[in-house]
Amino acid sequence: MFDTLSDRLAATFKNLRGKGRLSEADIDATAREIRIALLEADVALPVVRAFIKQVKERALGVEVSGALNPAQQIIKIVNEELISILGGETRRVRFAKSGPTVIMLAGLQGAGKTTLAGKLGHWLKKQKHTPLLVACDLQRPNAVNQLQVVAERAGVAFYGPQPGNGVGDPVQVAKDSIEYAKQKQYDVVVVDTAGRLGIDAELMQQAADIRAAVNPDEVLFVVDAMIGQDAVTTAQAFLDGVDFTGVVLSKLDGDARGGAALSVAHVTGRQIMFASNGEKVDDFDAFHPDRMASRILGMGDVLSLIEKAEQTFSQEEAEKIAAKLRGGPKQFTLDDFLSQLEQVQKMGSISKLLGMLPGMGQIRDQINNIDDKDVNRVGAIIKSMTPAERAEPELINGSRRARIAKGSGVQVGEVKNLVERFFEARKMMSAMASGKGMPGMPGIPGMGGGAKKSGKKAPQAKGKRKSGNPLKRAQEEAAAAERRALGPGAGQGPADGGAFGLGAGKGPADFELPKEFKDLL
């Protein structure tokens, strides 16, 4: 949704790079480009004005003029102001101190409230709560049946005593649901109300009556992220008529301009609490302003990626795989590889996962062209092998490749490529797990060198024969002995610290990778 905005901002910041000092004219030009980018993304005009004013005020201050890298300082300011207009800090659900917590959903018809009720129920269930979905939309045809199906799919309880389709009193259903939840010991009640086609006074009053009857702890306004400028008008009308405590963005995976997300929180003063970004029941999570700002600026969202991995991967299984890799490359089999692939698939679409990595905006088209069916094809190839072949891929010869290709419905070349890539990946993962770093890369202090140690003496390079002059030869031998004493990275780069200034034995002894990066690896 934010692709166009990201591209425009990236192009704007690119023009600033390489400038030692920024003049007032440079800052004005940058502010103008950012203003156009935000307006094209359908951000509300009052929001754009406030945003640009803040950026310009800070950019013209000491913060930027005294900075060693003004371009990076401008990006930092834009990032902080984006976080601010998106709501600042992450807003959590307020749970009731006693009795069930009541969460009421309100919004226009077609915004995705009923589907979102199921996603919210599923999310609450994962947070160790016992939610109950209540059907108070008795106007729309089959809305009650739809919520029942959604609740079953999400694996949560459903309450819908009235048939709907214009029959029943939604206010009474909402009241009764609280007593029902107390009896059955559900700790969260999610009330799905009727949507409106525009600002309908009668249905707005109905929503206000339901609110008065159940006194909800949270009233969430569900807004379709694809409706653009109209989202602000609708949000203001609901704020006046029903008064909501938080916003939920639905359809964030659409390709429309995402100005609604950047406008609603600033205009209404109510924070975005959740975002729905897909059709599956798992495509829903808490909204983090800092992470969204980071994505918009093309910096990725590694924290969300790590959280997804932690939710999906079994710690016990991960430790088993790590132990196998430390034991040597041959310990890691194609069965283990398939198990890892299947766990990655559970995290969601491969293209979405790659999109969370920093700098991936530059190859967005290639990422979007990744087909998740390719992963299924790899799985089919591995499953067409015998247990012995999966345990020892070295057994796979020409005739076996032909049989596997026939069994999995692929070309023989694809089987050959998969096995070769597996050998390379296994070798690299094993080297990293045993602390040797990536093969062919200089060693990183604290993680061991990347060069493979061998008992064989490396052949002398052509033209590097020893000098016939005894004095000169003695100097060469003394220099060589000094290099050996310094370690394998000596004499290869800055300050003899290897190609990247990270040669073994030259860095601080207490060097540690950041914890998040270690976890991700």
Image (spheres, rainbow, N blue to C red):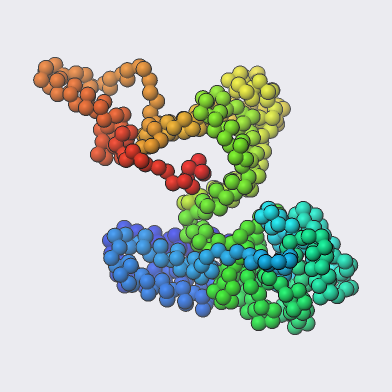
40 relative position to 377: left or right: left
User: How many numbered badges does the structure rendering display?
Assistant: 0
- Look at 65% across and 57% down and name the residue there: 284
Viewer-nearest residue: 211 or 438: 211
| Percent position of residue 329, x then y | 52, 25
Which residue in the rendered view is the most extreme toward the front?
98
Viewer-nearest residue: 443 or 262: 443
Q: Is residue 214 above or below residue 320?
A: below
- Look at 52% across and 77% down and name the residue there: 45
- Look at 82% across and 63% down and name the residue there: 183
122 relative position to 164: left or right: left
- Kindly indicate the quadrant of the structure image that contains residue 142: bottom right
| Percent position of residue 243, x then y | 66, 78
Viewer-nearest residue: 476 or 377: 476
Q: Is residue 303 above or below residue 451?
A: below
Residue 182 visible somewhere in the drawing: yes
| Percent position of residue 445, x then y | 36, 37
- Look at 71% across and 66% down and name the residue there: 98
The N terminus: image quadrant: bottom right
364 relative position to 29: left or right: right
Q: Is residue 311 above or below residue 135?
A: above
Residue 37 visible somewhere in the drawing: no
| Percent position of residue 319, x then y | 57, 35
